[in-house]
Amino acid sequence: MLYWSVLSLFLYFPEDKTEYIPAGITSVIFLIAAIITMRWIIKKSKRDEEKTKELEEKMLKQHQDK
């Protein structure tokens, strides 16, 4: 019974459902920002991978030439 009373302090379900609108808008904004950030990280990672492969090939060629 004590757990229920503690949890009920954090739960709030408003009677006026328009109070959900700001939370929904905020959630959508953060979701879009997270998607954009993840796509940017993936693109940056691919560019870095290509640069690393080029550098590795260059170093291998130099090592083989010696």
Image: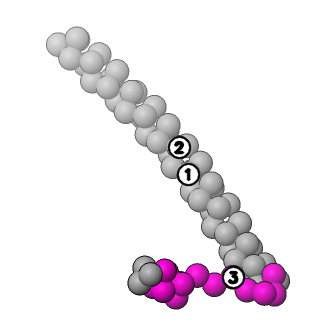
Q: Is residue 66 above or below residue 29?
A: above
Q: Which residue is mark 1?
A: 38
Segment colored magenta: 4-17
Look at the image and tell me in which quarter the N terminus lies.
Answer: bottom left
Contact between marks 1 and 2 (CB within 8 A): the answer is yes
Residue mark closest to the camera, 3 vs 1: 3
> What amino acid is at disc 1?
Met
Residue at point 81% right, 87% down?
A: 16
Check disc 3 and report its element: helix, strand or loop. Answer: loop
Residue at point 48% right, 80% down?
A: 4
Check disc 2 and report its element: helix, strand or loop. Answer: helix
Front residue (pair 32, 24): 24
Marker count (numbered): 3
Q: Residues within 10 Å of mark 2 (few under 14, many from 20)?
A: few
Indicate the position of residue 46 as horizontal and vertical percent values: 50, 37
User: Which residue is the extreme one toward the left?
Assistant: 66
Indicate the position of residue 27 as horizontal and vertical percent values: 67, 69
Contact between marks 3 and 2 (CB within 8 A): the answer is no
Is 13 colored magenta in this rendering?
yes
Residue at point 74% right, 73% down?
A: 25
Residue 42 got which mark?
2
